[in-house]
Amino acid sequence: MTKDFDHIVIGAGISGLGAAHFSARRGLATLVLEAAPRVGGCINTHEFQGLGGFWTEAGSHTCFNSYGNLLTIMDDLGLTSRILPKAKVGYRLWQDGERRSIVSALHFLEAAVSLPRLFTTPKQGQRVADYYGRVLGRRNYRDLLRHAFQAVICQAADDYPAEALFRRKPRRKDVIKAFTFADGLAAIPAAIAGQERLQVRTGQRITAIVPDQGGWRVVADGASEVTCDYLTLAVPPDAAARLLPTGFDGARHAIGAIAMAEIETLLLAFRGADLQLPALAGLIAVDGPFYSAVSRDFLPAGTHRGFAFHFRPGALCRDDQVTVACRALGIDPGQIAAQAQVHNRLPALRAGHTAVVGRIDSAMAGSRLAITGNWFLGVSIEDALTRSRRETDRLFGAEPSRLP
Ligand SMILES: Cc1cc2nc3c(=O)[nH]c(=O)nc-3n(C[C@H](O)[C@H](O)[C@H](O)COP(=O)(O)OP(=O)(O)OC[C@H]3O[C@@H](n4cnc5c(N)ncnc54)[C@H](O)[C@@H]3O)c2cc1C
């Protein structure tokens, strides 16, 4: 019996939208099902109510010219010509109640002595603390790198797998190094989801996947059902483990080893004139209850300035988060023009993760079910899309026109 779609993708974060794009451009009838009312997942450009369209990034904030798979999608959708460069503003450390320069925490001599080990120390299988402690020195790791990495992955960094952080990728010379869009990074998921070649349904929390005549029946919590020949799971690991159908016990067991980090993100907007703070990319917290703060100063808006503070879960109530954030920015909470809260989640990968992925892949081999996400190669947008591209190639074969 014919199915409703050739390919269904569950989850409309960048992993799922990428997988859908890669199948739709092969001419396959593709549907994306998303639990939330919006697409994008961790790509979440937040527009503040009543501030004339002023936005700040609640999640992902930067894409680079080394994001090759992302750039092919952007080329397909005519997005590459719309990119804007990010203003060159620097990060500061937030330590002992002061904003300090990054170099104030650097031990130059130790770095100079350690750096040659960069060429002889393998990354694979190492914890971040061990690898970077070796190639930049223990004190540099303790006083600077640990906090910088925590700021990036919004969780404790010591046990994170070194190979999953900062993967080297070729840069595309015709594209600016770090970019965004006039309406923020949400322009990317919006363009992928908005194309005519694929369908997206939001507000569809999927509760079960049932094998169905060589394909799949996908059940949403409203009990609606839709069928397909091929299926891609593009949800966080805990959701993927719950949804995996019977027969994939090996994969479910392997996925069970992957935890999630919860992040309480506080978004604040101020009138530019009210803030004395010089323009900055953000704050890297060395101590305190937040990992990092990312500003909107990379694309000045004239009237307002915005910040996303990424807090450890459960450390502070909202009022105390506001107090801490305003202290770090040097402004009175009474000057806040708008605020919002967002819950972010990122996978808490651990050293040895490559072997976990190997076990998942062996369990999925030969099936018409793919699994993608930011919990395979690393958490960057490009890591997620690289996994999506590989899984789509596994399901449907490589695209002849795009072979290297
Ligand atoms: C604060 C922050 C800053 C970041 N900054 C950067 C950056 O600057 N550059 C960069 O490259 N990366 C950055 N990242 C990482 C990157 O944004 C994410 O790793 C990536 O966007 C994750 O995409 P994903 O599709 O794998 O997962 P998600 O974005 O988490 O998407 C998963 C989707 O699945 C949906 N879902 C879950 N369960 C179900 C279900 N049962 N049924 C249907 N749908 C379901 C969810 O609602 C969600 O939309 C950042 C991440 C965070 C949190």
Image (cartoon, rainbow, N blue to C red):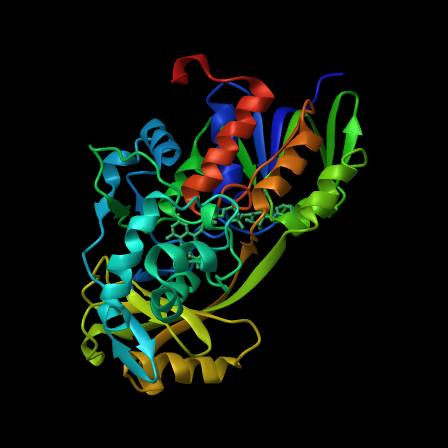
**Residue in the picture at 26% in, 47% down:** 178
Left or right of 159 on screen, residue 145: left
Q: Whole-percent x and y of residue 363?
A: 71, 32
Q: Where is residue 210, by image quadrant?
A: top right
Left or right of 399 on screen, residue 185: left
Q: Is residue 49 visible?
A: no
Q: Whole-percent x and y of residue 395?
A: 60, 22
**Residue in the picture at 49% in, 43% down:** 124
Point out the image quarter for the C terminus: top left
Q: Could you say which is closer to the camera, residue 398 or residue 112?
A: 112
Point out the image quarter for the N terminus: top right
Left or right of 208 on screen, residue 114: left
Q: Whole-percent x and y of residue 328?
A: 33, 80
**Residue in the picture at 70% in, 50% down:** 256
Q: Where is residue 106, by image quadrant?
A: bottom left
| Above or below, comparing residue 269 to residue 361 in the picture | below
Q: As drawn, which residue projects farthest toward the top?
A: 400
